[in-house]
Image (cartoon, rainbow, N blue to C red):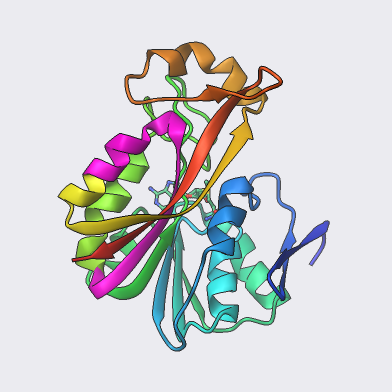
Amino acid sequence: MNGRIVEYSIGSLRIKIRVDRKVYMPSTATLCLARNLKVAKGTRVLDLGTGSGFLAILSSKLGAGEVVATDISARAIKAAKLNAILNSVNNIDFKLGSLYGPVESEQFDLIISNPPMTPSRKPLPRYTWGGFDGRAILDEVIRGAPAHLKSDGRLLIPIISIVGIGRTYKLMVESGFKVRVLDYLIHPFGNKLIELMDHLSRLPDSDYIYDSFGRPCWRLLIFEAIKN
Ligand SMILES: C[S@@+](CC[C@H](N)C(=O)[O-])C[C@H]1O[C@@H](n2cnc3c(N)ncnc32)[C@H](O)[C@@H]1O
């Protein structure tokens, strides 16, 4: 395996990820979700939109009995498989496909997903583009989750305020979930979001705040939705 390798620490665990500039690398949202990830021993976990495989590999290391990791990108699936080998993890089943397509009739104890959520009129790279309002994939992940969770199963998902926190909470409740927030952080916009500010300011559910340096910042909440 060639390429630069980045090592991440989550508690006492170390995870190595090979850099591929066409595959989403673990981000602030990924790492915040990771720090809040608890996996009961032997359970079945779905990582929907696995990217580099980081959250699937972590779930395996935390004790999952079986992990299914899906992605719409063949390149991401290939990268994630190599990263699983790099981390000596061998109970992840990697499947190529969109949303719940690859796991049509399967149920899990836990679904984790960090869907692409950047709102933009024009297409962006698939690993980041969430459609016009950032919710194109997110809403489908939430609506489809109850059918793929066992009773008391959980959906763990980071929500960024530019796609609308209240609207996401409402959708989860309407989809039959009990919802709580596990963690919270504030993060300054990167260059891409600064370019998109005009568009964001016209989206009715989008919100952001300014920090003491005057920088626009998004808020990130880690939601845990428990199937009622
Ligand atoms: C924001 S990245 C998150 C990657 C990884 N879970 C993480 O947190 O580091 C979103 C991932 O979802 C994938 N994706 C986009 N649309 C998808 C879809 N319709 N079905 C499954 N995966 C999708 C992208 O290819 C990308 O790898």
Q: Position of residue 222 (x, y in %)?
A: 46, 52
Question: Looking at the picture, does residue 43 appear above or below residue 99?
Answer: below
Question: Looking at the picture, does residue 58 appear above or below residue 224?
Answer: below
Q: Residue at x 72, y 62 (%)?
A: 17
Question: Looking at the picture, does residue 13 appear above or below residue 141?
Answer: below
- Which of 190/85 is in front? 190
- Which of 89/164 is in front? 164
Number of numbered discs on residues: 0
Q: Quadrant of residue 8?
A: bottom right
> Magenta region: which residues?
149-170
Q: Position of residue 45 (x, y in %)?
A: 41, 74
Q: Is residue 154 magenta-colored?
A: yes
**Is residue 198 in view?**
yes
Q: Locate residue 211 relative to residue 50 in the image: left or right.
A: right
Q: Quadrant of residue 149?
A: bottom left
Q: Residue at x 44, y 14 (%)?
A: 201
Q: Is residue 10 magenta-colored?
A: no
Q: Position of residue 199 (x, y in %)?
A: 45, 14
Q: Residue at x 52, y 16 (%)?
A: 197
Quadrant of image for the N terminus: bottom right
**Is residue 77 in view?**
no
Q: Position of residue 25 (x, y in %)?
A: 65, 50
Q: Locate residue 63 relative to residue 6 in the image: left or right.
A: left
